Image (spheres, rainbow, N blue to C red):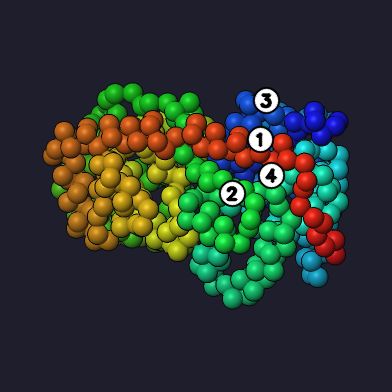
Amino acid sequence: MTAATNRRVCHVIFEHSVFDGRVFYKEACSLARAGYDVVLLVPEVRKGWLGRQYEQWVPPGETYERHGVRFETYRYPPRMPSMLGIRRTAARRAILAALHRIDPALCHFHESGLIMETVPDVRRELPNVRIVFDYHEFFLHQLRDRPDHPERITRFFPAEARLLESVDGLITVSDFISQYYRTLFDGPIATVMNCQSAQLFPPSPEPRSPDGTFWVVHEGWMRFNRGLRLLVAAAAKLEDPAIRFLLLGGLPGEELAWFEQETARLGVRERFEVTGMLPYEEVPARLAPGAVGIHFVQSRNSLTGVSNKLFNYLCCGLPILTLQHPVVGPLVGRADCGMVVPPDAAAIAATLDAYRRDPLLWKRQSENARRLSAEELNWEQMEARLLALYDELLRSQTPSGPAESLS
């Protein structure tokens, strides 16, 4: 396939779900609809299963395609020794071999760690392939939240320097991250936020909850640094028995044990429904009965962008209840699509009771949330940025120079 006719692009992941909302449902599916030949290269840990968590079974000798995206695999050997980087080196070689076989015009890489480390060797072995790296988050803040962060950060900086010498373009999830990398990288950078599309999250029916329950929704993993303690404490202070909490996702082990004990102690367990983690395509229907969306994220990493859940809430017309946040707070105030509350259980409970007492307030903010999604923060606008970057890179003819080889 010649460079002039090659429209094949390959997304490469290791840690993400093979059906990740950003990688698969938004970016890969958008590219497929735009006429690209899209391959998603994912790990195979056990023969016949796509992904590290055995997410999709594919019978031997068959291929798997979904929404116009073809899945290919590389072998990740979990039983191989990890000492001296043996397992990671084997996985990196497997990724390189798969890319030689796929023969893409452009490779789109996601994640730090193994995937980031592979990029310089792709540049060396496939010098004519355009390379994009996608910053889903600000890795430095993510690393600082880990207990072993000094060691990890020490390893991260040289790995990222090699990455930035190897790529042709960057994609980030927020303007903050784009501005930061413009100080380190001279090539094109596109901000592609995780906005939602009404095609994936269609408008919810009315009434929201036929039985009159006022569902306060949190989407995604519920952790201590996402407001779990505040939410449980607020539940104990609510006046209106119709207000309940819907946790669309799971709780990690420590959080789950605390949650069950504390809600039982306070006598509020019946106010909570916990679904466990859901397939992406089931989330819109579960959000449909929602009345208010919770955005209580408190980690360092969360301060540099907007959580995916917020875009889903807006698309479904849920007013946002958020703690003060450098991005979300001003956004909610400007659009009048929610409330900024202090990290105080009594204040949170009072705000939820106020929504129930004032349906006109709720209706106005719900309509404003939908309007903000439809007119400004929607995937269709982000898709245009993605396609523009791809077009720019594939029209250019000179890729970056070679980087050091695989060791």
Asked whether disc 4 touches disc 2, contact meaning CB atoms under 8 Å apart, the reply is no
Q: Earlier in the sequence, mark 4 or mark 3?
A: 3
Asked whether disc 1 touches disc 4, contact meaning CB atoms under 8 Å apart, the reply is no
Residue found at the very far bottom of the displayed protein: 150
Q: Is residue 334 left or right of residue 65?
A: left
- Residue type of the residue flagged with mark 3: Gly
Secondary element at image label 3: loop
Which label sits on residue 391?
1
Query: Nearer the viewer's eye, disc 1 or disc 3?
Result: 1
x%, y% of residue 128? 82, 44
- Mark 3 closeness class: few <14, some 14–19, many ≥20 residues within 10 Å: few
- Mark 1 closeness class: few <14, some 14–19, many ≥20 residues within 10 Å: few
Which label sits on residue 108?
4
Structural distance between the alpha carbons of marks 1 and 3: 12 Å
Query: Nearer the viewer's eye, disc 4 or disc 2?
Result: 2
- Residue type of the residue flagged with mark 2: Ile
241 versus 70 height, above or below: below
Q: Which residue is mark 3?
A: 35
- Residue type of the residue flagged with mark 1: Asp
In the rendered image, the quadrant that contains the N terminus is: top right
* Residue 11 in view in this figure: no
x%, y% of residue 126? 84, 47
In this orientation, which residue lies closer to the viewer: 29 or 57?
A: 29
- Residue type of the residue flagged with mark 4: His
Secondary element at image label 1: helix
Which label sits on residue 189?
2
Query: Nearer the viewer's eye, disc 2 or disc 3?
Result: 2
Structural distance between the alpha carbons of marks 1 and 4: 14 Å
